[in-house]
Image: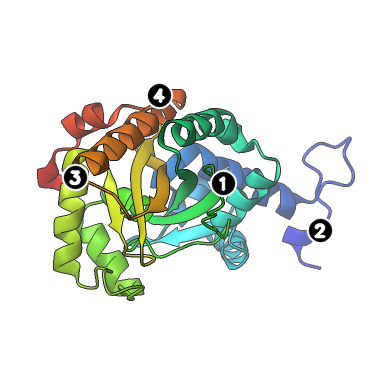
Amino acid sequence: MTDSDSLQPNDPTDRYTLRSVSRALRLLDLLGEAGGTGFTVTELSAQLGASKSATFALLRTLVAQSYVSEVQPGPRYRLGRAVIRLADSLNEGLGLMDVCRPVMHELTARTGWTTRLAVADEGHPVFIDRVDGPGTIRFTTQLGRREFPHHSAAGKALLSTLSAEQVARIAAENGLPERTRHTITDVSTLMNDLSMSRERGYAIDDEEDDEGVYCVGAAFLGRDGSPLGSISITGLKRDITTWRARELGELVREHADKISNGFGGPSWQEYLLTNPPANH
């Protein structure tokens, strides 16, 4: 047993506290406080009061189990999707469901479409909840799985908050695999699509993920303006007119802003004032 794994109580009255576990939990707390920006090994080491080698070992262990994610350039570290799964199992992780669920039900009631909720994981959507629309048609969603961002409205809504360099890097790392004959599979077309999505405040999946299925999604923002996730609606493509598509898009944007407000974040229009298109 190494020194870092030995019984080393933080409090002399607590004989059974493992220092390595306490440090790992403290590390997760620090990453939670950092939000989307994360920390470097050096920064975490200083805050933990541990050596860089010990801090790095903790990080690699947590990365391997998806509790921490590594982000380039840097690298920098932030919370991973395993934390999301734990939060979702409580059905009220950090108040997420308390804020989002009522808005999702309202959006489904107003549109008659299925509403889905995704959280952001390095520009990728991880769907964690769904409210089905009325009727017999059900749009299945595998919850808790990280998905490609380029062929869904929820994913493209998240990509629209990133810089062109960040989008290009995600595309280079993951590719743009084709789901249907309508899927965007080249970076230039994707950039143009994201530019339009950013300008209007919502993204569209026009049979790009599934034939005959139409989706609209919009990102919601945290207190610091960073994207926390996205909300989207899904329905059949039939009978979608131009005016109806615009109406649905504005409704989704309106409800995403309600979620942003619930977290103390800015509306999309407020966000654009401090994040002009030239930087994206």
Which of marks 3 and 1 precedes in the sequence? 1
Residue 247: percent from left, percent from top: 26, 35
The residue singled out by tag 3 in the image is: 242
Alpha carbons under labels 2 and 3: distance apart: 65 Å
Residue 257: percent from left, percent from top: 35, 29
Q: Is residue 66 left or right of residue 23?
A: left
Which quadrant of the figure has residue 183?
bottom left
For discs 4 and 2, the disc positioned in front in the rendered view: 4
Q: Amino acid at mark 3?
A: Thr
Which quadrant of the figure has residue 60?
bottom right
The residue singled out by tag 1 in the image is: 129
Q: Amino acid at mark 1?
A: Asp
Disc number for residue 6? 2
Q: Is residue 85 visible?
A: yes
Which of marks 3 and 4 precedes in the sequence? 3
For discs 4 and 1, the disc positioned in front in the rendered view: 1
For discs 4 and 3, the disc positioned in front in the rendered view: 3
Alpha carbons under labels 4 and 3: distance apart: 29 Å
The residue singled out by tag 4 in the image is: 261
Residue 278: percent from left, percent from top: 9, 45
Q: Amino acid at mark 4?
A: Asn
Q: Is residue 144 left or right of residue 19?
A: left
Depth check: give the residue in front, 160 or 66.
Answer: 160
Q: Eyeballing the image, is 200 above or below 175?
A: above
